Image (spheres, rainbow, N blue to C red):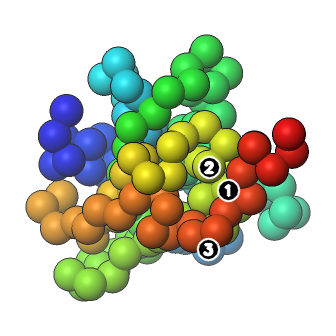
């Protein structure tokens, strides 16, 4: 799957966002090593601590179905009626980055942030989460 195709999947996932409080809709598309895509959207709650990000929704969905090997995730987020500028991206929060770290090699896993279907940037998890707390720290 190309990066453009994965970004399009994230835009589709964004359509299912439940964000009545912030009105900031986020979609994520997680790619497995086998080429399968799991979509996720942000799901808000009036008790803000119970809100779940799009990235974690996609990851938890995939893990709950037995997937454990991921290569990339595409993320797109903005309010309806507001067209993001070419340099406006929705980066994953710290909690989502730490959840990603649980399942991926940070040197290889790519995080693609998009402000449009044809405008995006790609980073490794290691670039966005240097010096992370790793599962190996608990051994």
In the rendered view, tell whether residue 80 sits above or below residue 70: below
Residue 39 falls in image quadrant: top left
- Give the residue pinned by disc 3: 22
Q: Nearer the viewer, residue 18 or 77?
A: 77
- Badge 3 or badge 1: first in the primary sequence: 3
- Give the residue number, with chain letter if any, for mark 2: 101
Quadrant where the image shows the N terminus? top left
Q: Secondary structure at mark 2?
A: helix
Distance from label 2 to label 1 (Cα)? 5 Å
* The one of 49 and 137 positioned closer to us in this rendering: 137
Instruction: Using the image, determine if residue 85 lies above or below residue 109.
Output: below
Can residue 124 be seen in this snapshot? yes
Nearer the N terminus, badge 2 or badge 3? 3
Residue lying farthest front? 139
Residue 87: % across, % down: 26, 84
In this view, the mark in front (2 or 3)? 2
Task: Indicate the secondary structure of the residue bearing disc 3.
Answer: loop
Residue on which the image places disc 1: 98
């Amino acid at each position: 799957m190309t990066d453009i195709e994965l970004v399009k999947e994230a835009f589709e996932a964004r359509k299912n966002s439940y964000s009545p409080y912030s009105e900031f809709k986020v979609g994520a598309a997680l790619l497995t090593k086998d080429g399968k895509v799991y979509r996720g959207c942000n799901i808000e709650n009036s008790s803000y601590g119970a809100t779940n990000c799009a990235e974690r929704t996609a990851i938890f969905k995939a893990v709950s179905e037995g997937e454990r090997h991921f290569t990339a995730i595409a993320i797109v987020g903005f309010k309806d009626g507001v067209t993001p500028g070419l340099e406006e991206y929705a980066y994953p929060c710290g909690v989502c980055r730490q959840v990603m770290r649980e399942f991926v090699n940070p040197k290889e896993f790519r995080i693609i942030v998009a402000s449009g279907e044809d405008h995006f940037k790609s980073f490794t998890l290691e670039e966005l989460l240097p010096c992370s707390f790793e599962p190996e720290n608990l051994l």
